[in-house]
Image: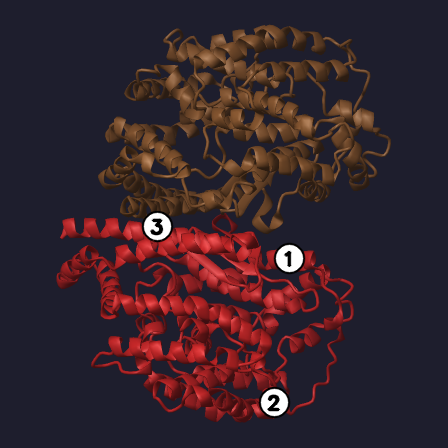
Chain colours: A red, B brown
Amino acid sequence: MEELLKIFDEYRKKIKAYGYAMGVISWDSATEAPRGCFEERSEQIGTLSAMSYELSTSEAFSDIVDAIYNRRDEIDSLRKHEIEVVKKDVDETKKIPQEEFVKFQILIAKSQDIWLKAKQAKDFRIFKDTLGEIIKYMKKIVKYLETDELKGYDVLLDRYEKGFTTKEYDAFFNKLRTELVPFFKKITKIKSIYNFDFNKEVYHKDKQKEFCNYLIDVLGFDRHYGIMKESEHPFTAGNSSTDVRFTVHYYENDFISSIFSAIHELGHALYEQQVNPILNHTFIGGGASMAIHESQSRMYENIIGRSKMFWEAHFVKLKETFPEQLKNVSLDEFYHFINTVKASYIRTEADELSYPLHIMLRYELEKKIFNDEIGIEELEAKWNELFYDYFGLHVEDASQGILQDIHWSDGTFGYFPTYALGSAYASQIFFHLKKDIDVLEPLTCEKMLEIKTWLKEKFHQYGASLYPQDLLKQALGEEFNPDYYINYLIYKYKEVYNLEK
Amino acid sequence: MEELLKIFDEYRKKIKAYGYAMGVISWDSATEAPRGCFEERSEQIGTLSAMSYELSTSEAFSDIVDAIYNRRDEIDSLRKHEIEVVKKDVDETKKIPQEEFVKFQILIAKSQDIWLKAKQAKDFRIFKDTLGEIIKYMKKIVKYLETDELKGYDVLLDRYEKGFTTKEYDAFFNKLRTELVPFFKKITKIKSIYNFDFNKEVYHKDKQKEFCNYLIDVLGFDRHYGIMKESEHPFTAGNSSTDVRFTVHYYENDFISSIFSAIHELGHALYEQQVNPILNHTFIGGGASMAIHESQSRMYENIIGRSKMFWEAHFVKLKETFPEQLKNVSLDEFYHFINTVKASYIRTEADELSYPLHIMLRYELEKKIFNDEIGIEELEAKWNELFYDYFGLHVEDASQGILQDIHWSDGTFGYFPTYALGSAYASQIFFHLKKDIDVLEPLTCEKMLEIKTWLKEKFHQYGASLYPQDLLKQALGEEFNPDYYINYLIYKYKEVYNLEK
């Protein structure tokens, strides 16, 4: 066994090194690489990823994995979990014929460009056939991956959040639909008493950056092991717990965008930094799942970052940073500004309450697609129809409707639902956190450190060494329950909009 | 043959992809990576470079190279040159026992740290034994690599500049010693009539950056295929002609440092950008040799960048950038300021005239080391003695003497001489350039474009597809001749210091 593990570790080291290299290159691409280098660069990335693929799907590696897997009762629990995860990956890859896989990759590589053109032209017809092709391939892939337990769309859902299939998601989204859609409609009918004119001021980029740097210290991101930078779209890149990076984008006419995207990314980044370093060399470093990761970013961004107690402690600094622009703005006004609910087209710009409705719509459509209940020809009309049902708005062009997200163009069906699930996890986690930490007083730096430490102990340190549902149960002593989310949203927005509780 | 080349190209693609990945990672390391990541990172780099080494020294690749090499008359001249270059590398690597090579790498990995400690403590004794070890290994390596033509130190010299051995360098440095040492001493005795108080002002970093951005446009660096950034020590990184990056360091109390290091690095960067893109995928992209590369950076930095005609065109902009600090400074004063000659300890800060004397000293010592004429115990004393001979200064501590450069700590013996040779090439090249382009008028952007185009046609486009001496001969119609360098320096500094010509 020792011999087997030694060989496994050799493969792991190499596969991880490829991943590391591609991680640094893609960080570079997103933040500063000269525009002219991308043609050349995509060839180099192609070669590196082909070498990595070759190694991780090699007969030799697969044999080692099988050999260890068959004797997995002889190894410690960390090793055991890791080998199960790897075995699943290797087996999945083996199930898809390589030729098919390569063809799909080529299709995906082209399709993002076509999607972008279609979005810019606001014309779904440009992308329609390509999307049809992608769906055809995805259905083929699903067929290859089906098991006794997992069929159809469930194959994809389980891929992004182990233990979550249509059964669990249906229960979740049905609740949201019943409880939140009417509540959301009620809220949007309330006329605001605020004008928020301060948002029309110019907020200098350097000043926004200064405030984001303040937030880094407030949330407790360790600069020794990480950096903040700029990019077109904010994101977090965790190469290991010792190298975590996140980006922000500054809009001078929309200053809260950088603030809340910094807090959001810091939620991801703190998670990555607090993973136990012994997992850095393994395949089970990083976050437990997409939804658990998203729970951390959304808890920081929304539950903490949009709370009155957070700004009780930090609004002073914000006013100091923008003394002219915020001269006449009270904490109460600011609090209502950052918690304004309204029906809007774009998911990524949606407020906390309407956000899950955007996800629900995508879930419904994806389910119909993989249940063969809807064809590519009817997709746009169906999108627009559902959108009107939930938001009461007519989609005027496809760029604010079916073409707004990149996800379908790179074949990541089954991924959207994790965004809403992450928010729901966040509410449940925060409910338990409140039992240990008093959050009804200003969330000063010290308080934020307590929160960070609590999250490390309960969640972050474990990285991906537990499956998401096991982690939740271990940390909270109960299973996932969507009621916390619904209760949180309704309670909070009744308070914000001054409705009887 | 076609089959062989196809296999060769497959290997080449992979080896280049490793190089590309390590290039991006090391750029990241030098410019922005969080300090805490380096331990983890060095393991990843270790793995990548081991994989790359394994591939490029594999029996299989070596066989392919041999097979093509033996039939090299059947292929075009570019391919032929490339296979000769690769064959030499592969053969060299095969000559050094792998065990020996690995031990040496481990020694080198540790030694830079020891060197740095010694330098900080200003105490050569801390580094002495390690340097002794390195030299012992280097001598062993030299023995492995010796051929009928190349023995001892010549093996190392030829490695960094093909065609240059002690024979050629002796002739070169003897001339410098005879002509320049007395001239330098004469110049340093002249008392300056200027005070240069403007150099005591503070020059804001952002403003320096603004001026460096101006220089980018003046010299014609293509931002579409490159970027400028900051790092502790300025350097240029060319991943391919489509991705060229350089760095600058800003000192607020020494504003010309960033200006001349930007011009220097731009000289390297323009070279990399102007290499024919068809060479990007080959092993013969980039520059023809270290010395040829250095000729471009030094020509831009010194011959052009410190000329009156350059500042005739651009001093206005400099004054605009620093209106307060340069209010009372005339072009003449500035010109004399940037061409001040003085005896100084640190090579990298030396002026154009004394620079080659610093190199000469290192060349003398390296020659003695590899001719077994000097032992590690006498090295520091000999350094200090030679330094007094050339500069008339007593070395007061090792950090301004034998410990100042990193080179010996990583085993790059034979490298220093290329710095002086590069300057000499530059003078010869510029002499010929002047026949085609009138440089006795202000060097405006248009003029600089003419120069850039001339260099592209004569040198840059060829990348490393010709050996340096062949390239020089093809471009200039004559062989290397150090007289151009000596004449240039004496003529220029007689003019600067107002001596009869």
Residue shown at the point (30%, 19%) measured from the top left:
B140
Q: CA distance from mark 1 to mark 2?
A: 33 Å
How many numbered tags mark residues here?
Answer: 3
Q: First in sequence, mark 3 or 2: give its number.
A: 3
- Residue A157 visible from this viewpoint: no
Viewer-closest of B493 and B39: B493
Viewer-closest of B401 and A118: A118
* In the image, farthest residue toward the right: B328
- Name the residue that disc number 2 marks: A187
State the image quarter where residue A429 is shown. bottom left
- The subunit carrying tag 3 is A
Viewer-closest of A263 and A249: A249
Q: Classify residue A231 as left or right of residue B106.
A: right
Q: Classify residue B199 as left or right of residue A442.
A: right
- Name the residue that disc number 1 marks: A209
Identify which amino acid the numbered label 3 is placed on.
Ala
- Secondary structure at numbered mark 3: helix
Report crowding for label 1: few under 14, some 14 to 19, many 20 or more residues within 10 A (C-alpha).
Answer: many
